[in-house]
Image (cartoon, rainbow, N blue to C red):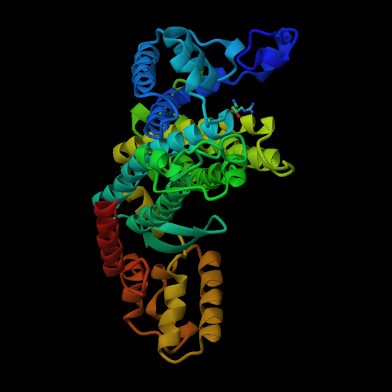
Amino acid sequence: MSEMMWGGRFTKAEEKNALDFNASISYDCRMYREDIAGSIAHAKMLAAHGIISAEDQEKITAGLKKIKKQIDEGQFDFSIELEDIHMNIEKRLTDDIGDAGARLHTARSRNDQCALDLHMYMKRQIGRLSEKLIAVESALLSAAVKYKDVIIPGYTHMQRAQPVYFAHHMLAYFAMLERDFKRLEDCYEACDMSPIGACALAGTTYDTNSLEEAEDLHFSSVYGNSLDAVSDRDYLLQFLSFASICAMHLSRLSEEFIYWSTSEFQFIELDDGYSTGSSIMPQKKNPDMCELIRGKTGRVYGHLIGLLTVMKGLPLAYDKDMQEDKEGVFDAIDTLYFALDIYAGMISTMTVNGDKTREALEHDFSNATDMADYLAKKGLPFRQAHAVVGSAVHYCIEHHKYLLDLTMDEFKSMSPLFEEDILEALKIENCVNLRESYGGTGRKSIERQEAHASETIAKM
Ligand code: ARG
């Protein structure tokens, strides 16, 4: 018989390389708190239904609390021979308290146990991540308020398009992260369902009550089908989808921060605390944090595709392939947590250079739409107005001018509809302030967005 906890059926020990390959303890040890809390609840339920004695329950609970303290304090040696966190803890408990420990696994399987631990672990991590998400959203809102008068060129195709308030740009990211937050709340809901009681796959013949156990562990509901409870990892895939979308948002912001901080743009300056230097070029100040966050987005996507691929061909119920669910999810959690934490600090400490953005706006044609709108409002069909202004831009480029440099005679020669007030209409401030359509960049629209953002944060 082999020494393993499941060794009864075996006549020889597992090969060393097979043992190493099989073990998940190096990463699933992260779930020790959940594993112990789950086992304490399981013992309580077993005792309440007369499946184990009250005395056994007490021994199990005290024994598990002792083990938790040892792990908390780094005094617990995990063993590869015991494969995973579940068997490491159970074996130690049984070594410590004897038969009572060996009764803990009644009406339970590692299949529902590991699913339970994962659901609980995800709930805890989602709580941590949502706090960080709120911190980034608060930083975006504060930056919008702090730089409320700064106007920047808005781009399409990376070409200057129309001016927008810097605040509008920050609030666009706020809106994206607000939806990420909702997605994260949905993930929490998906994880808030207990799989315990499903046992290996088919439920149990014991007179247990998995609802009681789930309630004790603060779950809102219980899986209604034992095969489903131990077989699916859709809640993890939902989380990885959320994480991928959120990382994509942060990656786009990173891309903008990177080029906004180049010498060519100089729209922002990242704080020294969030920048790095070069080992050879003394003048360099590099936006490494943004580049890393942009780069690490790749691994988050990879974990989503990785787990989707692991799951796609698996027959019901549990298959060992599913042990591959954890590392990617854990890494996605760590990566996103780090990225959000960095972003909260980086946004709060950066400086926005309104003079530079102004300079950029004064040397471009991003008020051209307003010139066309001016003519259209005076009755010229918009397509014709567009053509007049297109020629005006062409004329300006040939004569090394911008639209506001044109003389009244030049304006009049382009269209008799132009009058003195065209100069007002082309001013950058008016280009932004008059865009008061719902969600536009106008001042009142920004104020409405800010008020909504503050309310959203207060409710989070
Ligand atoms: N370490 C395993 C995992 O993470 C636990 C479940 C093992 N169950 C089994 N029947 N071998 O998936």
| Residue 414 visible in the displayed image | yes
Q: Nearer the viewer, residue 184 or 379?
A: 184
Q: Tag count in the figure?
A: 0
Q: Viewed as shown, does residue 460 lie left or right of 240?
A: left
Q: Residue at x 38, y 79 (%)?
A: 408
Quarter of the image where one finds residue 136: top left
Quarter of the image where one finds residue 455: bottom left
Q: Is 444 situated above or below 385? A: above
Q: Is 216 situated above or below 442? A: above
Q: Ligand 1 lies in which image quarter?
A: top right
Q: Nearer the viewer, residue 356 or 419?
A: 356
Q: Viewed as shown, does residue 322 lie left or right of 447?
A: right
| Residue 340 visible in the displayed image | no
The image position of residue 115, as x and y in percent, is 53, 35
Looking at this view, name the residue that lies furthest to the bottom. Answer: 379
Q: Nearer the viewer, residue 139 or 386?
A: 139
Quarter of the image where one finds residue 162: bottom left
Task: State which quarter of the image contains the N terminus.
Answer: top right
The image position of residue 22, as x and y in percent, is 67, 19
Q: Residue at x 30, y 55 (%)?
A: 150
Q: Is 399 situated above or below 75? A: below
Q: Is 236 situated above or below 452? A: above
The image position of residue 37, as x and y in percent, is 39, 28
Q: Nearer the viewer, residue 390 or 135?
A: 135
The image position of residue 74, as x and y in percent, is 40, 10
